[in-house]
Amino acid sequence: MNQHHHHVHAELPQGDSPILVEVWRGNLVESRHRAIAAVVDADGDVVRAWGDIERPIYGRSAIKPLLAIPLVESGAADRFGLGDREIALACASHSGEPGHVEAVNAWLARIGLSAEDLECGPHYPYFEPAAHAMLRAGEMPTRAHNNCSGKHAGFLTTAVHLGEPTQDYVRYEHQVQQRLLGILEQMCGQDLGDVPRGIDGCGIPTIAIPVGHHALGMAKMADPKDLSPARAAASARVLKAMTAEPWYVAGTGRFCTEVMRVTGARAAIKTGAEGVYMAALPELGFGLCLKIEDGNGRGAELVMGHLLRHFGIIDEGEAEQLRQSLTPTLRNWAGTEVGSIQPAAGLRDSAPF
Amino acid sequence: MNQHHHHVHAELPQGDSPILVEVWRGNLVESRHRAIAAVVDADGDVVRAWGDIERPIYGRSAIKPLLAIPLVESGAADRFGLGDREIALACASHSGEPGHVEAVNAWLARIGLSAEDLECGPHYPYFEPAAHAMLRAGEMPTRAHNNCSGKHAGFLTTAVHLGEPTQDYVRYEHQVQQRLLGILEQMCGQDLGDVPRGIDGCGIPTIAIPVGHHALGMAKMADPKDLSPARAAASARVLKAMTAEPWYVAGTGRFCTEVMRVTGARAAIKTGAEGVYMAALPELGFGLCLKIEDGNGRGAELVMGHLLRHFGIIDEGEAEQLRQSLTPTLRNWAGTEVGSIQPAAGLRDSAPF
């Protein structure tokens, strides 16, 4: 279906996903998280892998940087004068803080639309103080509060720019989604015409792609040497926007935001539901994808932080600065420290701390 | 340390926890949950087991029925005229609905204490409409809103009855906790003097006990033939209270409540944090304990429901009635059905549906 298929060359044995994360309480490991993880370069060579990286997973929201490419590549972002904040929001699972919601509404107004045109369902903000403030004020959430509203605004912007109908843009058959499917095929190097798919939390299709091929897509964003000039420029601009405006990618206290505030242009990282996490590492030219077998986000953050440390994206001093994000302590309702989330041996052995 | 140690006789191979739960989205298994599970009789014979049932776990809130025994056995419940609702609350992780909180406050008043004497931290109710109503009214949660407030009220009631200090009753060294440790040793058939322990969400110690021995403790409650008359009567009364007042054990829409409303006296089931679930099945004389390796509650509910169906506690018509609890569908923010939680082959093969 396209001429740019790459093969991801894995050399590690397949099989059960290894235990990479331990959740400690007192002096016992209470729970464990298994993961598949792949670090790949733009040629599809595997730099490092854990578990069966040929297993197809849904990229969920971690794939948003790839989904933001057409917004820039089509010329839509330039036509409507979008800046880093809007492009970061197109890649975001934001916390629904007032600044996120206001920016999405202002953006939609700029393309002649409103939150009513978004096809994602409303929900209260992830950021608890924002949700509580709305509840205290008797306010109901709008579709702009949905954590994916920036991505949806990006889809609408591209559709408006290209003269496509805006209605039903979440449907698999719509030009917006078909265009994204083509991008994913080219970037991830997989024919996606007949693979499993599902519906994401915000209503758009989510497509089954092997972990290693997701990593390849991110690697090509990080190292766009073989992409067309327009695709390469779009990839670079998306990553620059995410790393320049990390608060717009997630929000106050969130792992994506806290880490990118420290790593700057060295890492664009993005979380997704069901324990998926992806990264593009421009300095190294690597892409990274990981999936926690059981879908738990606490495990995904622990592995992502550890791999960034392992590959030197986070240095020792920065690791200290990010300590609560990288090796979180667990506290109970009274605020007492009761445990911690730690790398398991299979992950520990691979990293310098 | 006591004369009633039983050995749990497992015959199944140890090793990795088997995958018992699949989370489907579209036509792909997106996430998987592994579990250890044991069904044991009061003699410690293993009826059925999955995974390494000798692995120690924290029982968390699933152990509350065992922790409620001294409240009855000591005579405290009778002295203060407690009924099924209070005893059910002593076993509860309640949702903080107004009826739960009012009952705990009324109970505390009856023993001359108040929510200020509870040593669990406050949190907003688990039941979202109750939490939202409080936020809209500008109300802050009290310690009585903590999901464990009934258990703590039970601890205080026993301490008051026995003339012990009420302060610091959550501490490992306090008579309340030492008495509970003795009960757990006797019921679970394990010396617990030198095992790992941690602090639970509500501040009390949580003790590492093998999965199979947790199941043994529940089996002895279900079939108290070898217990002292006072212990046997206390066990029966605790189970009767839970199954007679299931709303007080959890709350509106919760799995424990919904299932016990259907199963009545045939099953007392109790959820705990980090994917633990336990049951006492008086009709069969079995105890059941399961632990999801990764700590996810959705997996624990699926396995519990399936095992109750397997052992005939839930019949075919009741399974239909409980369909959304037993095999839940997943919906996104817009209410679209996007997937389901299903038993994996390792669990499916063991059950009649």
Image: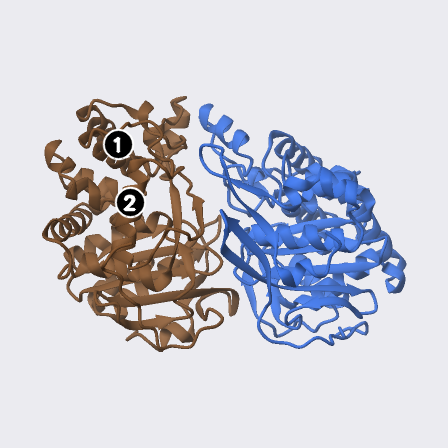
Chain colours: A brown, B blue
Q: Position of residue A30 (x, y in %)?
A: 53, 64
Q: Is residue A328 above or below residue A110?
A: below
Circle nearer the N terminus (1, 2): 1
**Closest to the observer: B308 or B142?**
B308
Image position, residue B29 (x, y; %) = 51, 55
User: Mark 1 falls within which chain?
Assistant: A
Mark 2 chain? A
Quarter occupied by residue A278: bottom left
Q: Describe the element under mark 1 as helix, strand or loop.
A: helix
As displayed, is residue B325 above or below residue B6? above
Locate residue B22 relative to residue A9 in the image: left or right.
right
Q: Residue at x 52, y 50 (%)?
A: B24
Contact (Cβ within 8 Å) of mark 1 with mark 2: no
Q: Secondary structure at mark 2?
A: helix
Is residue A113 among the parts visible in the rendering? Answer: yes
Q: Position of residue A60 (x, y in %)?
A: 38, 49
Label 1 – label 2 distance at C-alpha: 13 Å
Same chain letter for marks 1 and 2 = yes
Residue type highlighted by circle 2: Leu
Identify the residue under disc 1.
A156
Tell which of B149 and A165 is nearer to you: A165
Q: Residue at left 58%, top 44%?
A: B118
The amino acid type, in three-letter code, at marker 1 is Leu
- Which of these two is toward me, B128 or A142? A142
User: According to the image, label 2 marks what residue?
Assistant: A180
B216 shown above or below B101: below
Q: Quadrant of the C terminus of chain A?
A: bottom left
